[in-house]
Amino acid sequence: MKTILISYFSAARSLGRPGILWHLMWPTLVASVVWTSLLVMNWGALADLGTHFITALPLVGGWLASSEGALLVALLMFKIGLVMLALPMIYVTAAFLVAAVALPLMLERVAATDYADIARRAGGSQVGSVWNALTSVLQFIVLLVLSLPLWLIPGAGLLISLLLTAWLNQRAFSYDALMAHADKFEMKALPAAQSGGLFGVGLLGAAMAHVPLINLFAPALSGLAFVHYLLSALRVARQRDNIIEVN
């Protein structure tokens, strides 16, 4: 737990470097504008779809359709569900933008000062970063959709959202954190060896994503925390194995 917290304190310290703060904010701002606009523009159609869905439910659909009060309550719950569903979609869009664009740019600034002693082995690439981010997002969406029936269980929605977001953070940001410095073997071996700690870093970022205002910074701050966690682990691993750094 100490290493996880240190990685976030280091990420917060990195915010003082030129250009970092902007990259911390813009992905979530762009994602919020996109999804809020889509929700507003399609609100009427979504409400009609909700009414059709509710009245077509087996066993209770006919009763809901005949009771105006019950239908209004059910429709209100449906609309609240839409807003709640938009929140993870905003985060996953912001996480994609962070992983594919913002984090590689922040990595250059952070690594030049904090990890200049670590040789760059270039085990990853920008194309690999985009592909990793895209596949991570698609897998997250599939898992989210498959989990929707479980959200009807009180409290299950929050737990599922936390676990899936933690998994997304770990899956999307680990590649970017190592792509410039690790070789191809280290790109696979180090995340596997540090899987428990990395999930903890991702889980703390997922928790921040559910806190108002802090969630604006959560994707990029989580990405920076992965950079510090993994590059510190890479430095220790090379020192332990007596690997000679050649820059």
Image (tube, rainbow, N blue to C red):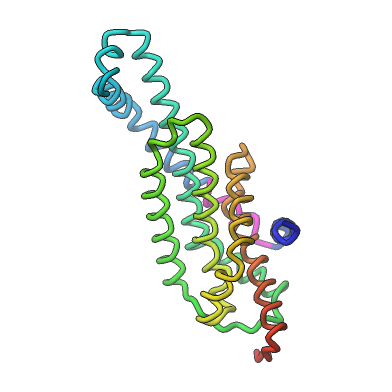
- In this view of the protein, which residue sits in the foreground, 223 or 107? 223
Q: Is residue 77 above or below residue 228?
A: above
Q: Quadrant of the N terminus?
A: bottom right
- Residue 110 falls in image quadrant: bottom right
Q: Residue at x 37, y 38 (%)?
A: 38
| Residue 244, quarter of the rendered image | bottom right
x and y percentages locating residue 87 in the rendered image: 49, 39
Residue 105: give x, y in percent of width and height: 57, 66
Would residue 23 appear left or right of 63 to someone viewing this image? right
Which region of the structure is painted magenta? 18-28
Give the dominant element type of the magenta stretch: helix, strand or loop: helix
Q: Residue at x 46, y 68 (%)?
A: 129
Q: Position of residue 114 (x, y in %)?
A: 72, 72
The residue closer to the viewer here, 211 or 42, is 211
Residue 111 left/right relative to 146 = right
Q: Is residue 48 above or below residue 238?
A: above
Q: Is residue 63 magenta?
A: no
